[in-house]
Image: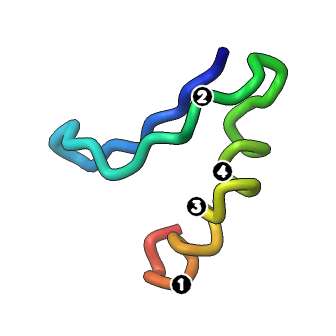
């Protein structure tokens, strides 16, 4: 199992992924869950 978390500058939770297979790593999870597109839309990344 693999769960990814995205936190803000003060360690506040912003997002958590669903439980995914352990073979999925950060970039793949972020891409499959739309996190990268959302951050780009809000000019955060």
Rendered residue at 68%/36% (across/down): 26
Classify mark 4: helix, strand or loop: helix
Which residue is most to the left?
10
Residue 19's disc is 2
Question: Is disc 3 in contact with disc 4, using a CB cutoff of under 8 Å?
Answer: yes
Q: CA distance from mark 1 to mark 3?
A: 10 Å
**Which residue carries the number 4 mark?**
30
SS class, disc 2? loop
Front one among 32 and 10:
32
Q: x and y percent of residue 15 in the render?
A: 40, 49
Residue 33's disc is: none
Name the spot of residue 36 as percent of width and height, x first.
63, 64
* Residue 32 shown left or right of residue 12 in the figure: right
**Which residue is identified by label 1?**
41
Q: Viewer-proximal residue, 44 or 12?
A: 12
**Residue at horizontal 54 percent and vertical 73 percent from the top:** 38
| Distance in Å between CA atoms under marks 4 and 2 | 13 Å
4 vs 2, front mark: 2
Indicate which disc, 2 or 3, sits on the residue closer to the N terminus: 2
Q: Nearer the viewer, mark 2 or mark 1?
A: 2
Mark 1 crowd level (few <14, some 14–19, many ≥20, 10 Å Cα): few
């Amino acid at each position: 199992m693999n769960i990814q978390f995205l936190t803000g500058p003060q360690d506040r939770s912003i997002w958590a992924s669903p439980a995914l297979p352990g073979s999925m790593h950060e970039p793949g999870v972020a891409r499959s869950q739309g996190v990268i597109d959302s951050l780009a839309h809000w000019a955060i990344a």
